Image (cartoon, grey):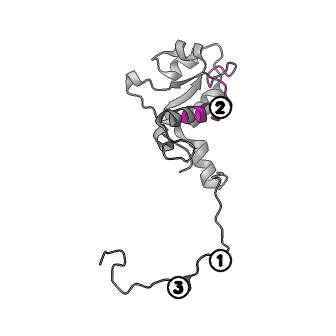
C-alpha cells in the first residue's frame, strides 16, 4: 500500500496505536501533501480538512475526497460543489484545479508506484542469512502441507 486511503489504515502502524493518533496522522499527511497550504487559495495555512464532495451530499472521508483548506475557504465553501464554488472565487486558478483533480484520482501516487519512484522505506535484502539455512528445513510429503495432521 503506497498511501493510506482511510485513517483506519494507520491503526496498526507501529507509530500509531490509538484511533485518535491515527486520525491526526492521516489528516497531517493530507496537509503535508499540499505543503501545509490551503489547496484552494494557496496563500493561507491549512488548518482544516475539507470534504470535496460534502458528507451531507454522500461524500466519504476517504483521502481522495479530503483536501487541506484554510478556515475561511472551508467555511465559505460549506456544502457547495467544490468546482462550482472554486471557479467563482477571485483566487481561482486552472493549475490549482488540475492539481485538485489529480488528487481526487490519486494520479500522482499511481504514477509514482508505476515508475518505481515511490519510496516505501523498505528494501529487499538478497544477502543470505547466517541465522537460518535451508539445509535443516523439514520437507512435507503430504499433498496439502498446510493441513493440520
Mark carried by residue 130:
1
Q: CA distance from mark 1 to mark 3?
A: 13 Å
Q: Circles 2 and 1: CB distance less than 8 Å?
A: no
Q: Nearer the viewer, mark 2 or mark 1?
A: 1
Mark carried by residue 34:
2
x%, y% of residue 105? 53, 39
Q: CA distance from mark 2 to mark 1?
A: 45 Å
Element under disc 3: helix
x%, y% of residue 128? 65, 76
In the rendered image, residue 82 lying in the magenta stretch gets the answer no
Residue placed at 49% from the left, 47% from the top?
Answer: 12
The quarter of the picture where residue 101 lies is top right
Front in this rendered view, residue 73 or 97: 73
Residue placed at 37% from the left, 78% from the top?
Answer: 145
For residue 126, side relative to residue 53 (left or right)? right
Task: Give the quarter of the figure containing the C terminus.
Answer: bottom left
Residue indicated by mark 3: 136
The quarter of the picture where residue 26 lies is top right
x%, y% of residue 25? 57, 36
Q: Nearer the viewer, mark 3 or mark 2?
A: 3
x%, y% of residue 110? 57, 48
Magenta span of residues: 26-42
Q: CA distance from mark 3 to mark 2?
A: 52 Å
Front in this rendered view, residue 59 or 6: 6
> Number of numbered discs present?
3
In the rendered image, residue 31 lying in the magenta stretch gets the answer yes
For residue 139, side relative to residue 36 (left or right)? left
Element under disc 1: loop
Whether 140 is drawn above or below 74: the answer is below
Residue placed at 57% from the left, 44% from the top?
Answer: 15
Element under disc 2: loop
Mark 3 closeness class: few <14, some 14–19, many ≥20 residues within 10 Å:
few
Amino acid at each position: 500500500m503506497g498511501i493510506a486511503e482511510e485513517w483506519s489504515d494507520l491503526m496498526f502502524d507501529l507509530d500509531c496505536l490509538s484511533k485518535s493518533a491515527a486520525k491526526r496522522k492521516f489528516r497531517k499527511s493530507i496537509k503535508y501533501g499540499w505543503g501545509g497550504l490551503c489547496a484552494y487559495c494557496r496563500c493561507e495555512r491549512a488548518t482544516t480538512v475539507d470534504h470535496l464532495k460534502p458528507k451531507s451530499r454522500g461524500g466519504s472521508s476517504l483521502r481522495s475526497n479530503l483536501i487541506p483548506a484554510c478556515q475561511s475557504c472551508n467555511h465559505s465553501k460549506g456544502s457547495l460543489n467544490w468546482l462550482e464554488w472554486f471557479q467563482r472565487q477571485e483566487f481561482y486558478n486552472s493549475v490549482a484545479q488540475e492539481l485538485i483533480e489529480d488528487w481526487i484520482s490519486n494520479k500522482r501516487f499511481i504514477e509514482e508506484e508505476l515508475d518505481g519512484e515511490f519510496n516505501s522505506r523498505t528494501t529487499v535484502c538478497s544477502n543470505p542469512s547466517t541465522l537460518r539455512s535451508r539445509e535443516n528445513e523439514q520437507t512435507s510429503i503430504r499433498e496439502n502441507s498446510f493441513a493440520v495432521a
